[in-house]
Image (spheres, coloured by chain):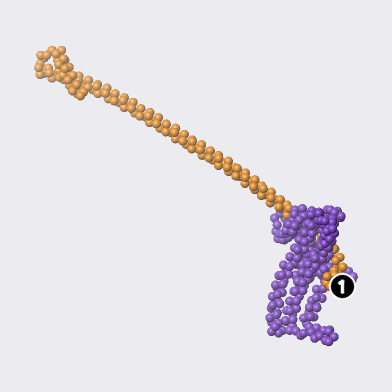
Amino acid sequence: MSAPVVTAAGAAAEVSPMTEKIGHLLHELSVLPLSDGAFSLTNYTFWLLIGVAAILVYFIVASRKVSLVPSGIGNLTEALVEFVRNGIVVDVMGPEGKKYFPFIGTVFFFVLFNNLLGNIPPALPGTGTVGTTFTWAIIVFIVYNGIGIKKYGFFGYIKSLVPSGTPWWLSWLIFLIELISHLLRPFTLGIRLFANMYAGHIMLGVFTIFAALAIEHFTPMGAIVLPLSFFMQVLLRAFELAVAVLQAYIFTILTAVYINGALHAGEH
Amino acid sequence: MELIIPNTTEMWINVASFTVLFFVLAKFAFPPITKMLDERANKIRESLERAEDTRVEAERLLEEYKVQMAEARAEATQVIEQGRKVAESMKVEILAKAREEAEAEKTKAIEAIKAEKSAAVGEIQKQVADLSVAVAGKIIGSSLSRTDHEALIDKYLTEVGSLHEN
């Protein structure tokens, strides 16, 4: 590894292999259109569509396999559906929340499948780009506010942002804080998922770079770095699997919490 | 910075993905699965309730059978006891009757023996008298009249008879 030589002008005359490879990694992980057209698939949406197709195929097959006495793929599907319906929807919203399961289930399986797909090289997670996570966060935002407005009416819902009994001189401030907190939700929801998936791939890439450099420039130091990098790769893959499931769970449970909040907006 | 500015094309692809996914899953995939889960939950609940009913019924029947069994056992004991009593009384009766009959037989036999004996004694007396008369006649000739003889024999026989009876 040679250190970059910086000229008096400040520009790197010679780029180190490390910097070059990291630059390459960042470029690979950025949103890249696959063709020149204005409406082109990107590297992420390419895998996203594969993920969506996988969900459709899986559920179309699985929904035919469910029976009173479950077997094979039916068991897994039931466990997943039951997990979202009871473990998330009913847990957060109570039994009356079951009618929102189709939406919440769609969100969960979309995020879960795309997160997991990103763990199969060379696939990228469809959820590793803000184009995806913000869009889904905005959909959640529109849906939960829509549910609240449908239940309380537009002005009723807006009024419910301020708890009843608040003094008038304080209510505008609380209204403002509540409004900002609601408007921030799609950002926090979107950024959290994106950052987790993106960072995971950066980490995996960095240890791949370490391993590659250790092979390319074989030194005594490299002999230590190489097995360590492989070990970290394996560890991170397992970690990423856990993150994939956990982030799908978090995204979904927050969706359920937001819908529940909108449904009970007038109760405080 | 461009990292967190969403690509418009990506957003539209996601909107389309959501639309298709939500439509297909909510319309075709989820309903059969959730319907089946609810059906199974109901079926299990029903089965458990039915099993509970059956258990209660079985317990009731068992209790009933136990009572019936105890009654039957008591009845059987009673019948046996009764039978034993009847047999006992029959035994006593039969024994008494047998004893009575035996006694009657015995009495009858004794009487017959007595009759036989007195007949035999009479016979002997008669023969002894005749013999005595004959003997006496031989010894003392015919000095004694017949009447005297008979009186003498009678006296003698009475003595002999009383001796014999003792």
Residue A176 position within the rendered picture, expressed as x and y whole percent measured from the top left: 84, 61
Which residue shows up at 31% across the image and 24% down it?
A: B108
Query: Which of the image's four quarters has the N terminus of chain A?
Result: bottom right
Amino acid at pointer 1: Ser
Q: Nearer the viewer, residue A30 or A71?
A: A30
- Residue A126 visible in the picture: no
Q: Is residue A212 shown above or below B77?
A: below
Residue A50 position within the rendered picture, expressed as x and y whole percent measured from the top left: 80, 67
Please identify the quarter of the rendering in which residue A166 is found: bottom right
Q: Which of A151 and B60 is in front in this view?
A: A151
The colour assigned to chain A within the rendered structure: purple
For numbered disc 1, what is the local secondary structure?
Answer: loop
The colour assigned to chain B within the rendered structure: orange
Please identify the quarter of the rendering in which residue A266 is found: bottom right
Which residue, given by chain and number where applicable, does mark 1 sit on?
A35
Query: Which of the image's four quarters has the C terminus of chain A?
Result: bottom right
Residue A221 position within the rendered picture, expressed as x and y whole percent measured from the top left: 70, 83
Give the farthest residue toward the right.
Answer: A38
Left or right: B45 as drawn, with respect to B95: right
- Residue B39 visible in the picture: yes
Which residue shows up at 87% across the image and 72% down it?
A: A35
For label 1, count other residues whose C-alpha is less than 10 Å away and answer few (under 14), some (14-19) or many (20+): few
Give the farthest residue toward the bottom.
Answer: A8
Q: Is residue B49 shown above or below A237?
A: above
Q: Nearer the viewer, residue A242 or A37?
A: A242
Left or right: B36 as drawn, with respect to A132: left
Q: Is residue B133 shown above or below A256?
A: above
Chain ID, mark 1: A
Q: Which of A250 and B11 is in front in this view?
A: A250
Residue B125 position within the rendered picture, expressed as x and y whole percent measured from the top left: 20, 20
Please identify the quarter of the rendering in which residue A126 is found: bottom right
Which residue shows up at 73% across the image and 84% down it?
A: A217
